[in-house]
Image: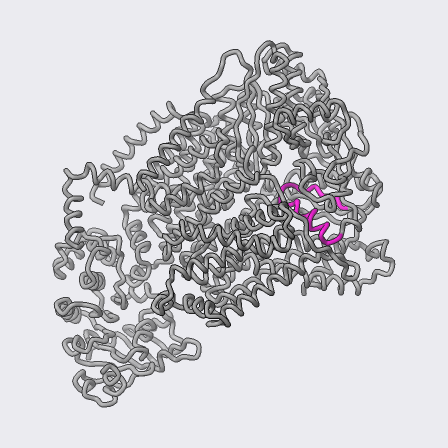
Amino acid sequence: MSLNRRDFLGRTAALTTTAMLPTAVFADGTIKLGSILDASGPFDAYGKPMDQAMRMAVAEINEAGGLLGRQVEVTAYDTQSDMALYSQYGQQLTRQDKVDVVHGGILSASREAIRQTMRKTKTLYFYNVLYEGGVCDRNIFINGVTPAQQVEALVPFAMKNSGKKVYILAADYNYGQITARWIQKFVADNGGEVVGTDFFPLDVSDFGSTIAKVQTAGPDLVIAPLVGGAHLSFFRQWAAAGMKDKIALASTTLGVGNEHKVLTPEEGNGIMCAYNYSQELDTPENAQFKEKWAAMFDGDQSMHEIAVSHYHGIKTWAEGVRQAGSLDRMAIIEALETGISIMGPGGKVTVDPKTHHAVLDVHLMQMQDQQMKVIETLPQRQPVDTQAVCDLSANPNDNTQYEIQI
Amino acid sequence: MTTRSTKSKSNRVFLPGGVPLAPRHPFYSFKQVSMDLSFVIAVEVLYAVASLVLISAGLAVVFGMMKVINLAHGEFMMLGGYTTITAVGLGVNVFIAMLVIAPLVVGLIGLIVERLVIRHLYGRLVDTMLATWGLSLVFIGLATMIFGNTTTGISTPIPGFAVGDYQISGYNFFIIVVAAVLVIAMLAVLRGTRAGLIARGTMQRADMAAALGYSPDRIYMATFFCGSALSGLAGAVLAPLVGLVPTSGGAYIAKAFITVIAGGPSLIAGLLSSATSFGVVNQVFTFAISPVIGEVALLVAAVVLLRLMPQGITGRFFKGKL
Amino acid sequence: MERSLGREIIATLIVSALLIWLLPMVIATYTLTVLVIYGMLGLSLGLIWGFGGILCFGQAAFFGLGAYTYAIAAINFGESTVPMLLAVLVPLIFAAVLGALMFYGRLTDVYLGVITLVVTLILFKFVNSTAGPQYVIGNARLGGYNGIPGFQTLNVPGNPDAYIWGDPYFYFCAVALVIVFLLVTWLLRSSFGRVAIGIRENETRMALMGYDVAARKTVLFATGAAIAGLAGALFANWGEIVTPGLFSLGQSAEIIIWCIVGGLGTRLGPVLGAAGLAYLKFVLGQQSLIDNTLITGLILVLFVLFLPKGLVPAVSALWKASFGRARRRPLARQRRKARHG
Amino acid sequence: MAETVLETHGLTMRFGGVTASDNVNFSLKARELRCLIGPNGAGKSTFFKCVTGLLTPTEGQVFMRGQDVTGWQPHQIASLGVGIKTQTPNVMDALNVHENIWLSARRFHDSAEAKARTDTIIDRLALGAIARTELGQLAHGERQRVELGLVAVADPWLVLLDEPAAGMSAQDVDRMTEIIHELTRSAAVVIVEHDMQFIRSIAETVTVFHQGAVLMEDHVDRVMSDPTVRAVYLGKKA
């Protein structure tokens, strides 16, 4: 037995040394892009495709000759869905690896765990995920959709297709709470009435009593900003109770992690949502993107909303570097603040100089046979929520996440 | 009590000024609401109790017979879920997959685990807990490597139906029936068969069975197989209701653990009494306030209960029952 | 027991000074900092479990409580000295109340496990569901799942603008660990510690000798919680964010695994187990060949099966067996063992 | 003349429908040595546990030196100066003999004094050779002796022993008898015992339990020759 143990210990030791290598060996003259994502653990459904998108974007940049004549080199860390590892790897990226830019973070908690480190160490940071809005910090660029961009489009669309009484079922954390308030606002703006709002921690998976409760209120439409695997059961149980044909359903999150491919057509059909990207978007950019992705990852089809956002983010950064003609952080920030635009698979993405958020296309969709059919595209929506509180051209030293008063 | 508190709550929140409920039902009277609603709530409470029984049965059998707390129990359930989904994907009828294949497969996995790990640790309660905890992590890792970490699932094979103006899930009834059949079957086996007699003997005094010429080794093997199969069954039956990920087991183990310990030494009476107490507490608070408070109420009830009855419910009441 | 306390203190100081000097040359200080903090957390459970026989499934609860107390207090006070003290006091008081509830109720082993586990779950679920704007303590929003970012980090007492961070923070944490380690050493050598070990060995006997077992277990439990709380506060300072994940069962599980792997009934074992396994986890995060959880689980199973006493006792036994012949006492003991057969 | 150190009034203990201890009135004078005998299930052990605080009696009271200690915890009773030894050897297996006895001495004295007393007791009980051996490695008789040492080192005025001679060799029993006699110089001693030979060698007054109640209480010789006692107890044994 002792032999086995020694063998085992020996192996782990070997592993330790090999794992240490890639961080120490670097070719000179490359541009270092730091990536920090949950490629394993409960959030890897989001993180893995984001990692793929990042590698694809970098590959494309390098194929086209790199940036400023230099190749881009990726230093990637898997945070294993553990918030503590964000702090740790964030420090590692900025202090030891001394990367030129960091792309990553998925949950808002993970972004907040590293944002200050990035700021303190003057490392440019891109957070490329749909989130609750309000971050105002000149060191960060964000190009996911915010509630105003998404909800403002989704609510009238969904209400038009159902009725005026709305019930909100939201995930009980920052994103869900804030999104729910935006939904309440836009429902009222569109002449509707919110008849009930319930919040669910991310680990709740039994919605039986909730479904009964919703029926007591008798709404025409349920909007569900629910997040994660456990919450997916709501859509199952809703269909199982035979509610699908009685009350219409909309969501601000379903499909972001390709959930529509997990639900059966009977469970998913008809659910309405609004995002910056759908695999079914019929544009030449998207066709090309999907083709390249499939070629690069052996026919894989896992690209989704936030993976594409991540891809947009890296392309935006690359464009900023090109325009700045330098790797200097301030030069890149100033170049980006000129309002740079790129064309991506999700449409045109423009940097909003005031907020460092993105002006982007929002596509209204409806699920149909495990696809997200695009019904209508609303071009170039402004991040009005964050614009209401954040003006980095007036207050360049701002460093707050505002909670927007609605 | 349940209905009243819910009613007043729904009244306060959803019916400001006594506005009729839904325009689609012009003759919607308040009386009807409460009757239908109380039926719906009754079903939900029964369902909560039934799912607690299902979740805990495997753990209870292993604990009751072997005094082993299997902390990989939740992962056995997770494996039951994955077995079902894989089998259905291969074209097997969903009921056969849930009720036959999943218990068998997970039972066999349990058997392997018992031979490789557990049998070296009999009589060391804390060590078995730690080893099975380690096993649970191993299973999560394996499932992640095999099935990936994306949420998977199958849809419920039974359609919902209407109760008055309410739609309720038909699958809830299926769960209740499965739990009821399970309890009756366990009773029948323990009371009516030779194996049950040996099992009861072992529960009372493990050395007695040995003295009577039954190999404890084989009894433990059989028990662990049965316990694991029950966990597999529970995981399989609950799979259509939840999105399955490799870490799904964690959601069950704490509840199962609490239910079994609070139940106390009697296998079936303990299981039923604690599942009923916790199920009712959970659902009452869920309806009256919110699902979170429901969960917290369950946990608080567990603390209070164990403080008052440190030997579990059946340590004080229903003594000597099965 | 044979060596004098003074000699042991000096040995500890020399070894730790060497380590604090040498380790930053091998591993980056910000990684070392968290290893040191986890070491302290491991020590907190190692104390109550290894020397008091109290298996707590919820040590993470006190860790999280310390971290949250620090974060909330730091936002409200705008400096770090009082929050640091509170971060030790609040878990201490919480554990004293919880411990009294359990130990005067004569709950043992499994039941103790259930209660501590359940209390951790309650805390986790509660903190996790505080995202709404109504959950505010003073100026601090509890923030639910996202946790609390942006609080005042450690500063020189009396001077809120003089932050202690980076390398100095590592030295601060390392010295804190050494001090806690020495305090634990002293505690275990005192009558209180020896009585605690007696209680671990045989509770009934100690009660029959007139010791108030429940009171002593409560005090020990609270001491462990205070150390865990301090570790939590240090962790909050290091991560600059606190999240409900600190209260999670997964975190509790890791602490237990550290103790098992390092060795129960030793002071050094849990510290080394914690630092070693946390470093392993950190290193494994940089590869994607094998699933991390799988390895952690495998380590735990293998240790329980083949090395249930943990690394430190095993290594010291090996050391004694191979180099201890010159010494008198182990030899005498071996001879006696042979006699008793 | 001598003060009453232990007294029970109508002590009754019921478990569900079973009355394990039935209205026991018992009293013991200072420095008296008393044996409790009776067949299995006669209620000796239940009585013992009620007196030592391991069980709380359903009815009745327990007095020690006139103080009502009914419902007290074992550690409170022990703190009065009562030495207790339970049926199975109850010691700290991973600690050595010296540490075991020191822990008992430390309860009533400071560390240095406890050490001195421990050394004295170890000498008196002739445990010197094994003073640094862990209890887990000792033979049964030695463990019993150490446990008596634990009791003795605290200078009790009342000692309650549950089957101290069980499973011991004749030589060990002799030594045990000696120790007990020594204890009676300063303490009253109650012994629950099965071993009749041991009882004959040590006891004067014996209390016989039967079906939870006290059957008789008299000098050991008269008890042994009593036909009722023979019928319920000795008769059964034969």
Q: Position of residue D6 (x, y in %)?
A: 27, 75
On screen, residue C222 versus residue B27, left or right, reads: left
**What's the residue at 35%, 82% (across, down)?**
D23
Q: Position of residue B35 (x, y in %)?
A: 76, 65
Q: Is residue A228 magenta?
A: yes
Q: Nearer the viewer, residue A165 or D234?
A: D234
Q: Is residue A212 above or below residue A76?
A: below
Q: Position of residue A301 (x, y in %)?
A: 66, 31
Where does the N terminus of chain A fall, quadrant-wise? Answer: top left
Q: Is residue B242 magenta?
A: no
Q: Nearer the viewer, residue B244 or D185?
A: B244
On screen, residue A1 versus residue B191, left or right, reads: left
Q: Position of residue A237 (x, y in %)?
A: 69, 51
Location of residue A164 by image quarter: top right
Q: Does residue B134 appear in the picture of this structure?
A: yes
Q: Nearer the viewer, residue A375 or D190?
A: A375
Q: Is residue C141 above or below residue D123?
A: above
Q: Does residue A398 appear in the picture of this structure?
A: no
Which range is magenta?
Answer: A222-242
Where does the C terminus of chain A fall, quadrant-wise? Answer: top right
